[in-house]
Image (tube, helix red, strand yellow):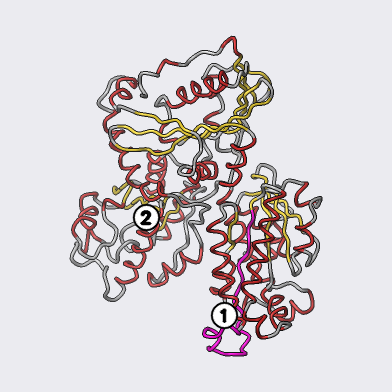
Amino acid sequence: MTFQELKRNLKKDFAGLKPLKIALLGDSATQFLAMAIRGMGYEAGLNIEVYEADYDLIFETILDAENKIYTDKFDYIVLFHSPEKMLHSFYNGGIEDQKKFSENTLNYFQNISDTIRKHCSAGIVIANLPEVNDGVFGSFSSKTPASFLYQMRKINVGLQELAARTKDIFIADLLSQVNNFGYSNAFSAKFYITSQNLFALDFLPAVAKVFTDVFAALSGKFKKVLILDLDNTTWGGIIGDDGIENIQIGDLGIGKAFTRLQYWAKALQRRGILIGICSKNDEHIAKEVFEKHPDMILRMEDISIFVANWSNKGDNIKYIKDVLNIGMDSIVFIDDNPFERNLVRTMCPEATVPELPEDPADYLTYLRSLNLFETASFTDEDMVRTRQYKEESERVVLQQSFESVDEYLVSLEMQAKVEPINAFNLARCAQLTQRSNQFNLTTIRYTEEQLKSFTDARGKALCISLKDKFGDYGLISLLLLEKKENVLEVNTWIMSCRVLKRGVEELAVNEVVKVAKEMNCDTIKGKYLPTPKNGMVKNLYSAMGFQPAEEGISTLEASSFKNLENKINIIQ
């Protein structure tokens, strides 16, 4: 998109988009960047309200405990620094100061983040720094600590380490985006000198996308599934015509392009992205390549769902969505055929369907540039997600052999564990708040640091894990409970849709009742805040025995407390 297109977005109707408040603090002019972020937010389904702090007063703003960035409860505070400004500061120091420039700058970022976290619970998004080689040392810059480029690279590594050890700090990777475009294309010297705007207007949409990708992921908007076509997408050639020996894959010729794509998909699968297949083919012929071809990188154990038939791909992708129990907007579909891409866009408009280049050699470079799989977290459970979905398919097959649901549930031999938030499950709990959209009663997002402060100062958390004879679901539900006088409020109730209607809902309410009794509360208050995605839990509280108190709120009074043990024998 162009900057002008983003500017036109500002006149569109943002009603119904997820609201988000950010404070933008910059040491250079930010007015055009703020416009671009808000305009790109519209493309991402976010109503981003951007507050621009005073120009080039980052440290002074953060030190002021009464400043608007603290009093107005922003979701995120964004720190945007200009490498050109840093270069000016670097030149003003002596040679020994220059050798310590990265150390002093990282101490500055540490102090800033510590001060922000002391005054508010907003997440912190730090833009890393595009590298500027000032030409003073040439390539020798990479060898001497006295060069600006050497110091800049140390700063960017230090920012990564700061974010890695501080759970509510996130990096907006402007460096990679500038590397893709080239600094001379991203930066306009004339524009900077006349207006103090760091980036050229033509580059601002790319900058804004970096920020909105991060905000979207933190708000629960991200991709979970990569669906691949096969012929001329995953390998070269047509398996039904060419045969397994003649498809193009491996290290020779154009086959290398398809191998590179498979390596990328395999890396995504290891990170927790589900890989699906949607192909017009005979299933047994298509699967044979995964099972027998020596040069295949993707194997059947990497695939969560394999659909190969002669039905139209729009219907097949809807089927995949239903089987995996995910939103259509969580899907990325890759197909070399323009007809199939347009069909899926028409039938599944919420899915992301990249417009692949004609030359397979360009597939991967193009897909990398789109940053399709931004995330806000990564846990051990992500690495076993494919296995968990394969286990779920085994449960589906088993269920078909029982006449009643209760008999089937008993046969699963389910065991649950309820525990508070601790050092071992904190990351997964935060991830649940960020990733869950459907079974999410209030859709409040928490970072790890915010969860810590919640349980320390505001209430109690219930973390529920589940396993059965097929495998371990891991941590699948989180409830955050607040005591307000004699009322226990359910601030947050999230559950993985993979365990719907297996007795976990009843088990969770039983546990909430126990907490209410322990805290001498005579009322439990459950709140439902509707979103476009959580309609499935609209009537959850009433189904659990709560009575409507007011719009969006239901209560369970002490006189009507009851142990919902109708399925207590199903989960041990």
Residue drawn 20% across the image and 50% down it: 284
Residue drawn 21% across the image and 64% down it: 242
- Residue closest to the eye, 527 or 212: 527
Determine whether, in the image, residue 412 is placed left or right of residue 445. left
Determine whether, in the image, residue 521 is placed left or right of residue 506. right
Question: Residue 107 location, x and y as percent?
Answer: 65, 66
- Looking at the rendered structure, the kind of residue marked 2 is Arg
| Quarter of the image where the N terminus is located | bottom right
Question: Residue 475 location, x and y as percent?
Answer: 43, 38
- Residue closest to the eye, 414 or 295: 414
| Distance from Cα at disc 2 to Cα at disc 1 | 33 Å
Question: Is 128 included in the stretch rendered in magenta?
Answer: yes
Question: Residue 393 location, x and y as percent?
Answer: 31, 38
Q: Secondary structure at mark 1?
A: helix
Question: Is 87 included in the stretch rendered in magenta?
Answer: no
Of helix, strand and loop, which mostly describes the magenta segment? loop
Q: Which residues are magenta?
A: 124-146
Closer to the eye: label 2 or 1: 1
Q: Is residue 382 above or below residue 184?
A: above
Q: Is residue 313 above or below residue 61?
A: above
- Looking at the rendered structure, the kind of residue marked 1 is Tyr
Question: Residue 397 location, x and y as percent?
Answer: 27, 33
Q: Which residue is mark 2?
A: 270
Determine whether, in the image, residue 23 is placed left or right of residue 382. right
Q: Secondary structure at mark 2?
A: helix
Determine whether, in the image, residue 421 is placed left or right of residue 310. right
Residue drawn 53% across the image and 20% down it: 513
Residue drawn 72% across the image and 80% down it: 88
Q: Which residue is mark 1?
A: 150
